[in-house]
Every structure is written in C-alpha cells, then in structure tokens.
Amino acid sequence: MKTCFFLALAVVSGMLPAQEIALDSAGLDPRYLEDQFYVGLTYNFVLNKPEGVTQRSLSYGLMGGFIKDIPLNPRRNVALGIGLGYAVNSYYTNLRASETETGYSYSILESNASFKRNKLETHLIEMPLEFRWRNSTAATYKFWRIYTGVKLGYVAGSRSKLVTDDFKDSFYNTDSRNFRYGLMLNFGYNTFNIHAYYALNHLFEDGTLTQDGQNIEFTPLRIGLIFYIL
C-alpha cells in the first residue's frame, strides 16, 4: 500500500513537462508555483450518532499527500489545486461491530461495560480539489492562505476492532461506505494552518442498523492542523 502511494505521488508531481525557467531582473521566477506536499493531524468528531452511542478515547486522523498548483491570474495569488493523498482515520465509540454468518451486527455497549478500545479504522486514497487564495509572491515564503473546496476519497480498507481485558476481536468491515466526499477548508499563515472537513455522506452504507433498529448515520467532522512543505 505504501509503495503504491509514493508511486502515485511521483506521477502527480511529474504531470507537467520540464521546461527552462526565465528569471526576472531580480533573479526570481515570475511563473512560480505553490506545488506543495502536505501532512495533517485531526480530531475526528462523529455527528448523527444513534441514541445511546457516545465517543470514547481519542478519535484521530492522519493524512499526507501532494497538491499540484494551477494559477488562474497573472499575479498567481489565485489558483486551483489538484492533489493525491493517503489518510487513516479512527473513530472510537461504544458501538460494537460483530461478524455474523449473514454479515455484521451492531450493538451499543453499556456505559459501565469493561472494554479498553472499540473503534472503526479506515484507510483512504484521497483527492483534494481546492480553490486557492494567498498573498504570496515569488520572493515571499511566509504568507496567508485560504484554500477551500471538496475532498474525494476511496476506502482502501476498513477495520472494526474491540479490545477488552480478556480478548481482542478485529476484522475487515465491508459495511462502511467505499466512496467518500465532503467539504474542506484550510486557512492560516506560513507552515501552520487550520484544517476542517465535513463529510457529505455517511460513514456506513444506507440501511445499516443497530440491533434495536436505529439507523447508523455516522457523519464525520474532522478538525485539526495541516502543514504545507514546498
């Protein structure tokens, strides 16, 4: 998986043909690009939880990838960004998934139940599509930015895991929705920026129910930090 990811980044970063760079009188490149590698860390909120379901422990997300910059104006402070990346997201709740002969069963663990961890973990190939504004120049490496747009994702793997004092139950869960999409906003100054992502579809497939008949309509909201590296 890691090998495929880095190969994909190499393809994206080499999309444009090599060409000679004509510098201006100050020795700067007037056709500079804000092509960037990025890494991020988020806290993952779960919205639209069934009654009785709560979050526990630290639901976190990690992401990384590459953004190709496409300037839209001569000043080059307005642009589009097309990226490719990889993300892993964990959602810790008291909603337990169990494998059965006919598929999966979901039950709500009581608040006094003794368990160490219970989570759903997803691994995604992601494609951010950004509209980008910044006050950068060819000579400015520290600048303000507001990047907003959508992020598409495909789940390469999804795993449910329960850990108690007595046993561990872990399996790949195909009930999670494979194709993901949502709105995102990145804003800040220089390397450190705020990242927010709100999913526009549910974490599980439509019609997924708890044992007591409630719809599981988990909707991720991820807020954290994103770091850009030129």
Image (cartoon, helix red, strand yellow):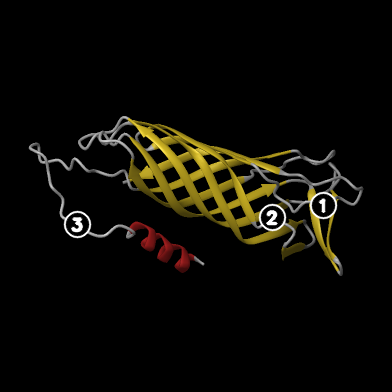
**Quadrant of the rendered image containing residue 157:** bottom right
Task: Tell me the amino acid under the disc marked 3.
Answer: Gln
Q: Is residue 134 above or below residue 94?
A: above
Numbered circles on residues, count: 3
Mark 1: secondary structure: loop
Q: Nearer the viewer, mark 1 or mark 3?
A: 3
Q: Residue at x 30, y 57 (%)?
A: 16
Task: Tell me the amino acid under the disc marked 2.
Answer: Arg
Q: Residue at x 28, y 44 (%)?
A: 33
Mark 2: secondary structure: loop
| Front one among 131 and 114 | 131
* Direction from residue 119 to residue 81 in the image, left or right: left
Q: Bin the neighbour count of mark 2 within 10 Å (Cα to Cα): few under 14, some 14-19, many 20 and up.
A: some
What residue occupies the far right of the structure in this picture? 212
Image disc number at residue 177 = 2
Image disc number at residue 19 = 3
Mark 3: secondary structure: loop
Query: Cα distance, mark 1 to mark 2?
Result: 11 Å
Q: Bin the neighbour count of mark 3 within 10 Å (Cα to Cα): few under 14, some 14-19, many 20 and up.
A: few
Q: Earlier in the sequence, mark 1 or mark 3?
A: 3
Q: In this figure, which residue is indicated by the disc labeled 1?
A: 207
